[in-house]
């Protein structure tokens, strides 16, 4: 393996790790927003405010629901 190929492999590895960290941080923000909603605290973080507004307490799959009764 040449030096250039080795550097490309290292860069690809680091890019993958950064992507993983970004996803993890997004999940942490979502969990924190959920706990703050439960505790009744309002966050000043704009990302968490968006998550608080868009998150519902119950999951409802429209494909398995009929007149509020689950088919499955």
Image (cartoon, rainbow, N blue to C red):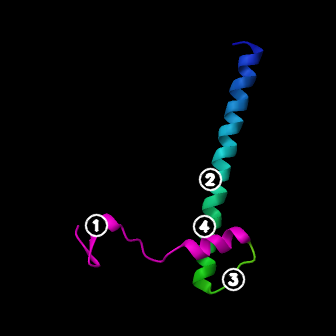
Q: Which residue is mark 4?
A: 30
Residue 11 horizontal/vertical position (percent)? 73, 31
Badge 3 crowding class, 10 Å Cα cut-off, few under 14, some 14 to 19, many 20 or more, is few
Residue found at x 69% / y 83%: 42
Q: In the current view of this chain or complex, which residue is farthest to the left?
A: 71
Badge 1 crowding class, 10 Å Cα cut-off, few under 14, some 14 to 19, many 20 or more, is few
Specify the segment rendered in magenta. 46-72
Q: Which residue is mark 1?
A: 64
- Numbered disc 4: secondary structure: helix
Which residue is at the front of the view, 33 or 10?
A: 33
Looking at the rendered structure, the number of numbered marks drawn on it comes to 4
User: Image height check: is 59 above or below 4?
Assistant: below
Residue found at x 65% / y 39%: 16
- Report how far apart the C-alphas of labels 1 and 3 lie in the structure: 34 Å
Tell which circle, 4 or 3, labels the residue nearer the N-terminal end. Answer: 4
- Report how far apart the C-alphas of labels 4 and 2 lie in the structure: 11 Å
- Numbered disc 3: secondary structure: loop
Q: Which residue is mark 2?
A: 23
Contact (Cβ within 8 Å) of mark 1 with mark 3: no
Tell which circle, 3 or 2, labels the residue nearer the N-terminal end. Answer: 2
Residue found at x 26% / y 78%: 67
- Occupied quadrant, residue 69: bottom left
Which residue is at the front of the view, 44 or 62?
A: 62
Quarter of the image with the C terminus in it: bottom left
Q: Which residue is mark 3?
A: 42
- Numbered disc 1: secondary structure: helix
Quarter of the image with the N terminus in it: top right
């Amino acid at each position: 393996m040449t030096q250039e190929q080795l550097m490309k492999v290292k860069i690809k590895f680091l890019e993958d790790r950064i992507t993983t960290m970004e996803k993890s941080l997004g999940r942490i923000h979502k969990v924190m927003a959920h706990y703050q909603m439960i505790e009744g605290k309002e966050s000043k973080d704009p990302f968490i405010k968006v998550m608080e507004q868009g998150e519902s307490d119950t999951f409802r799959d429209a494909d398995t629901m009929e007149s509020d009764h689950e088919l499955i």
